[in-house]
Image: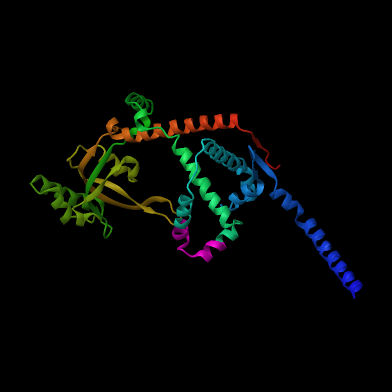
Amino acid sequence: MGTKTNQHTFKVFLFLAGLLAISNHSYGTELIELNRVVAKVNERVVTWGEIENAMTLLNFTDQEKKLRANQFVDGKVDRLLSIAAFGEKGMQIPTSYIEQEYNKRLIRDFNGDRKLFRDTLRSKGLSQLEYRKEIEEEIIYSHMLSTRRRLKEEISPEKVELYYEKNADKYKTEAMVQLGEIAFSQIAGEPETVLLQQAHQVIKEIKGGLSFKDAASKNGQSPFREKSGDWGVMVSEREIRSKEIKKEAFSLKEGEISKPFIVNILERKPDGTVGSSGKIAVYILQAIKVTKSGRKPLDEVRPLIEKTLASEIEAKSHRQWLSRLKRDAYVRVTLPK
């Protein structure tokens, strides 16, 4: 009996060994690749599997993975250096704080559904313990970044003014106008002489004391007629497609009313382009409000410049800090070919 049992056990062993050999033959290369060490920061190693998983979650193609792998490894190294520096300072994140963030994410991202949460972690190849570790590292990294930030007070008014002068083009303002219009369109193919006659009659009434708004609400076929002809917004030259309207609009002074002029009506073609419709209209414009081109005042853009300078200083300071950490730590990076 014992001999038969031993023979059976031996056969099962051989069968499993065969399966294992087949498995290793099929998946061995992949397992080696995934477990390959691509970076080492002091005693902490980073595997290709970690980096590839991060890129896979972003749906990168194989080609994109090859192009971006170095950036992902650099980011991971920077994070590990920051975490190492945190530990060297003897600081710790309270367990209660990590647990609080853990529960917050469970509610925020998974509506408190623990099964969905566990299934999601499993699909990413993470255990709950590993997920907690990720949270802890994120908290530490954010803390170390915040300690590198420069205060607003460190940015002097002189630096702001110098940046303002050197980057004048960034703060240019375009000439803009808010228009009112009266438009006479060809309803039944009227010749331009008839449209011009109607327009000149309106001009005569305006000169006689009728306000432009009243004239615009009573005459023509403008789509803005119900709004007394008012476009309602300020526009720049590049925002007006009609060359005739553009030319007339930016030749007017604020409050000035144009003479009647002919406009070639534009239309959108089946291919999406915009071109002449072959029809005309006669327009009368009023420049309700006009602003000239120039540059935004320094006081208006000062907060924006201070924020820009702060970001530049922070980025430079962070790079220098990481360089010092790399100099003092053992860092080795070896990406797969």
Q: Is residue 216 left or right of residue 264?
A: left
Q: Is residue 185 left or right of residue 61?
A: left
Q: Is residue 252 left or right of residue 94?
A: left
What residue is shown at x 84% (from left), y 68% (from top)? 12
What residue is shown at x 71% (from left), y 48% (from top)? 33
Instruction: Look at the picture and state if 140 lies above or below 114.
Output: above
Q: Report the quarter where the N terminus lies.
A: bottom right
What residue is shown at x 27% (from left), y 32% (from top)? 299
Return the residue found at the far right: 3
What residue is shown at x 32% (from left), y 40% (from top)? 237
Residue 39 placement (x, y as % from top left): 65, 40
Return the residue found at the far left: 209
Please check the rendered image and state whether residue 118 is part of the magenta-colored stretch, yes or no: yes
* Residue span colored magenta: 105-119
Is residue 191 among what the camera can see? yes
Residue 251 placement (x, y as % from top left): 24, 37
Q: Report the quarter where the C terminus lies.
A: top right
Please check the rendered image and state whether residue 24 is part of the magenta-colored stretch, yes or no: no
- Numbered disc total: 0
Return the residue found at the far front: 2
Coloring scheme used: rainbow
Secondary structure predominantly adopted by residues drawn in magenta? helix
**Camera-side residue: 38 or 279?**
38
Residue 207's quadrant in the figure?
top left
Is residue 297 among what the camera can see? no
Residue 24's quadrant in the figure?
bottom right
Residue 139 placement (x, y as % from top left): 48, 46
